[in-house]
Image: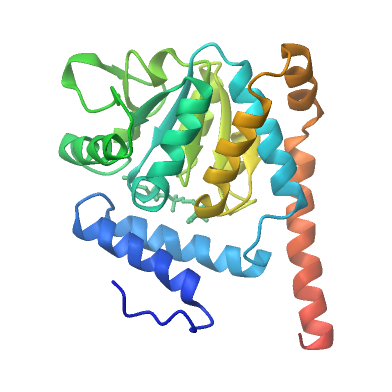
Amino acid sequence: MGHIPASHPRAASLRVREALVAGAERGLVVREGLIAHGRGEALDYILGERTGRRARSAISAAAATLLLAERPVVSVNGNVAALCAREAVMVARELGASLEANTFHGDSGRRRRIAARLESHGAMGVLGASRAHRARLRGLDSERGTVDSRGIAAADAVLVALEDGDRAEALSRAGARVVAIDLNPLSRTARAADVTIVDNVVRAMGLLASRCAALRASPRGRLAAIARAHDNAATLAGHAGEIRARLGRIASLGR
Ligand code: PTJ
């Protein structure tokens, strides 16, 4: 780390790459996670690398949805642990939610490392790494379906970020509300979730923590109204329109 000059026009993006590479070297991130990041990075570039109006509105709906839940869980995979562990812990703290290490690839050793990383940022009792409390999420044959009986298996709302689509669908079928952070408005996760924040986790997780803090004392009626006002399909269509308009402008004006 440290060889990226602050003056480099892509310094912020290069630092995020470095954080992921460091995460891979520490055994938090799998190689597939680096590939997944490339896809996200390309979409972020097209979307303008900023948290736009639609994403901010989705962040409010996400905060309201999670605050209304009785048993919310923040699910953390390798990429999230490497990119925004501190902010994920802050979200869980504001919600009074459990944090659960949950991965698509690999072994319980990596889940333990993810838990340790969250604990280094002040989390306590991170779920997902103990064999004693293993449960299966119905209809999900991958490793991601191995969940904690005290956490995701019993949750009524789950925050998932940077994921393949199967789990959002399985959680929805199981009756949980799903809040997703995913830069791809076309992905299955984005479409299966109740609220999708189309933004980079690097920006969105901290903003979500702040929004949860701001709304935490609100009456349930106000939270329900905020959650109800969110139309996920329309928001995703809006993001797709934004991409089309941005590319159209570039194509016609050359900038
Ligand atoms: O740690 P594991 O084993 O759970 O593995 C995690 C990965 C990411 C490898 C796994 O879940 C996976 O393969 O994911 P996908 O199917 O590639 O989907 C990742 C989604 O996240 C894609 O829609 C990407 O566009 C999006 N994405 C990538 N980077 C970011 C992102 N969304 C938000 N912020 C990012 N930084």
- State the image quarter where residue 1 is shown: bottom left
Q: Please state the horizontal and vertical placement of residue 50, each as a whole percent of the image.
A: 65, 61
How many numbered discs, if any?
0
For the C terminus, the quadrant is: bottom right
67 to 240, vertically: above or below: above
Residue at screen point 54% across, 11% down: 70
- Considering depth in this image, is 175 or 197 the residue closer to the camera? 197
Q: Work out whether residue 194 can be spotted.
A: no
Horizontal side, residue 59 vs residue 159: left or right: right
- State the image quarter where residue 56 is shown: top right
Residue at screen point 31% across, 75% down: 2
99 to 197, vertically: above or below: above
Q: Work out whether residue 115 can be spotted.
A: yes
Q: What color scheme is it?
A: rainbow
13 to 4, vertically: above or below: above
- State the image quarter where residue 26 is shown: bottom left
Residue at screen point 21% across, 41% down: 113
Horizontal side, residue 73 vs residue 122: left or right: right
164 to 130, vertically: above or below: below
Q: Please state the horizontal and vertical placement of residue 85, each as a whole percent of the image.
A: 38, 44
Q: Please state the horizontal and vertical placement of residue 201, each as a whole percent of the image.
A: 51, 50
